[in-house]
Amino acid sequence: MLTSKKLKEFARSRECVLGVANIERFDDAPPMMHPASIFPEARSVIAIARRIPRGSLRGIEEGTYWPSYTYFGYHGLLNTWFRPKIAYEIACMIEDHGWEAALNYPGVPQRHPDARDHDIKPVRGQSDVQLQVRIAAYAAGIGEIGWSKVFMTKEFGPRVRLETIITDAELEPDPLMPPGTLCDRCMSCVKDCPSGAIPHIKEGKVVEIEIEGQKIQWGDVDMGKCTLSTHGGDRTVSPFLVKELPNVVWDAKKMDFSEADAYAFCWPLSTGKHHGEYIVEGHAMLQKWGVGGSYILCGARGCIRTCMDHLEKAGRVEQTFRNAPFIKRPRWLLTPEGKKVAST
Ligand code: SF4
Ligand code: SF4
């Protein structure tokens, strides 16, 4: 018999965290984000968190080595190979018990610029559905959404990537995590986000949803600014860009782009000589194979690195390291003109 316990044990044997939500927890979800828009017979949504190795962020933290996070902590291999592998295994396990497992690939609702002209016709009232994986993971009880909008678990803090499976199997749901269990609203992520993408709580830019009477909130992150910093359009976190375009100076903090336009702005920069030679070359090879897609410059400076340093110091994360803390030296940041400055 298929049970939540059996699925959890399997996930744990693969060093992943798994939780289950019943479909009723999505009652207030809009059709474009509703699991039943994908699988009308859905009874449960399973969320799985696979960890980002802490050391994949080390090179960026030191300002010396970028590829590791791109490949082992983000899109290059973790998102496209390591994470889906566990979801695939669990889906097969579910289907071996006679239930259907609709795998969900966590995508970005604002589609890649190359796909923006696609005219997707509604078939049954709703097309282009994207399950919001962080909300699904919260509904499945495996953690909470931090103020920075990054999902965090008690095992690994913000160092996780998420996967979801929708199934018609009726499984025992997990309890919701009370908000504030992990994120204490310290606002360190706000301070250390290079482009100012994460609003301070005092600004009142809040997203709020309710599940089973539990109100959960997070900051309304400016995804245009975040995309600039993450994908190579922010000179303060990209020594490559400063070398590539020494005389074209802009300040990502002052740019007002949508997420899609920020992608469109960053994409051509990835073909630049220095980005290309250092980070993207191997990645481009993966893209030719149909995987991968983006390269990472910011390295989640505020929303993962600072946050995990804070949560580890506060004893709010279970996984500990012998050589703590993570942030060991004064941090680096460039000015838009390319001058190196010490940060906090
Ligand atoms: S740094 Fe982490 S714990 Fe602090 S407010 Fe941001 S998300 Fe919450
Ligand atoms: S990835 Fe970078 S720019 Fe985006 S929210 Fe995190 S710290 Fe800010």
Image (cartoon, rainbow, N blue to C red):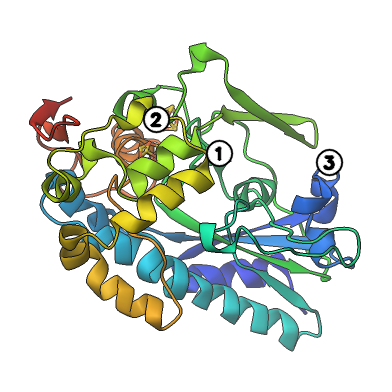
Residue 72 visible: yes
Residue 16 in the image: state x and y as whole percent: 48, 64
SS class, disc 3: loop
Q: Residue at x 17, y 33 (%)?
A: 333
Residue for badge 3: 28
What residue is pinned by disc 1?
145
Choose the circle earlier in sequence order: 1 or 2.
1
**Which of 63/42 is in front?**
63
Whole-angstrom CA distance, mark 3 to mark 2, is 34 Å
Most distant residue in the bottom direction: 96
Q: Quadrant of residue 292?
A: bottom left
Q: Residue 169 sits in which quadrant?
A: bottom right
Which badge, 3 or 2, comes first in the chain's sequence?
3
Name the amino acid type tagged 1. Ile
Q: Judge by depth and name the residue closer to the eye, 322 or 194.
A: 194
- The quarter of the picture where the C terminus appears is top left
Residue drawn at point x = 88 percent, y = 67 percent: 123
> Mark 1 to mark 2: distance in Å?
26 Å
Considering every residue shown, the one lying at the far top of the view is 202
Circle 2: residue type: Met
The location of residue 220, given as percent across then percent down, is 56, 29
